[in-house]
Amino acid sequence: MMEKLLKDEIVRAVSQVFEAQLKQPVELLYFAKKDNCETCDSIHQLLEEVVTISDKLHLSTYDLDDNAEDARMYNVNMAPEVVIAGREGEKLMDYGIRMAGIPSGYEFSSLIQDIIMVSGRDSGLRPDVRRALKKLEKPVHLQVFVTPT
């Protein structure tokens, strides 16, 4: 048996946060590669440990090459990558939230916050920001990069 990645105190803390804040089911769609992916197994294990914390979380795993159509549907073009989507029965709602690479350190808290945000089905943006965004006439591709250094 592999050693757990999440320490018991982290699991307890995340469990309390999820119990208090998760509202609706969330699906984590994990895209990996069989070859040339040094961190794929570790990330898969981490995601499996996270989804066991709440019955509102589900994990689907895809191979970027074998499931190329699914990758295209979710605009995934690299591995490892996680799509964080809302789940309503069999229907998935894609809010465009992605995480590439291993969510460790500060990125782990970003993963947890993204799951909570998708579960609430609300971005948390202020009304004035929402009004400004409605005025956009062209699609905007926004990326946030986080590094441990």
Image (spheres, grey):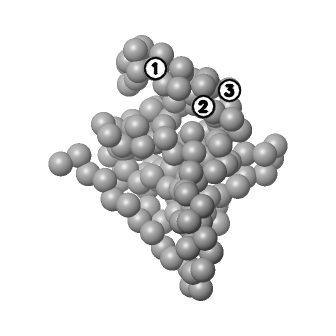
Q: Disc number at residue 13? A: 1
Label 2 secondary element: helix
Label 1 secondary element: helix
Left or right of residue 48, residue 103 in this image: left
Q: Position of residue 62 (x, y in %)?
A: 58, 50
Q: Earlier in the sequence, mark 1 or mark 2?
A: 1
Q: Tag 2: Cα neighbours inside 10 Å, few (<14), some, or many (≥20)?
A: some
**Residue on which disc 2 sits:** 21
Q: Position of residue 72 (x, y in %)?
A: 60, 68
Q: Tag 3: Cα neighbours inside 10 Å, few (<14), some, or many (≥20)?
A: few
Label 3 secondary element: loop
Q: Position of residue 95 (x, y in %)?
A: 62, 58
Q: Is residue 68 visible?
A: no
State the separation of the CA atoms marked 1 and 3: 16 Å
Q: Position of residue 44 (x, y in %)?
A: 47, 38
**Residue on which disc 3 sits:** 55
Identify whether 107 is placed above or below 100: above
Q: Nearer the viewer, residue 117 or 104?
A: 117
Q: Is residue 50 visible?
A: yes
Q: Disc number at residue 112? A: none
Which residue appears at 39% of the width and 38% of the height? 108
Q: Tag 1: Cα neighbours inside 10 Å, few (<14), some, or many (≥20)?
A: few
Which residue appears at 65% of the width and 36% of the height? 58
State the separation of the CA atoms marked 1 and 2: 12 Å
Q: Earlier in the sequence, mark 1 or mark 3?
A: 1
Identity, as a three-letter code, of the amino acid under mark 2: Gln
- Tell which residue pokes out farthest to the bottom in this image: 137
Which residue appears at 65% of the width and 43% of the height? 120
Which residue appears at 68% of the width and 26% of the height? 55
Quadrant containing the N terminus is: top left
State the separation of the CA atoms marked 2 and 3: 13 Å
Q: Earlier in the sequence, mark 2 or mark 3?
A: 2
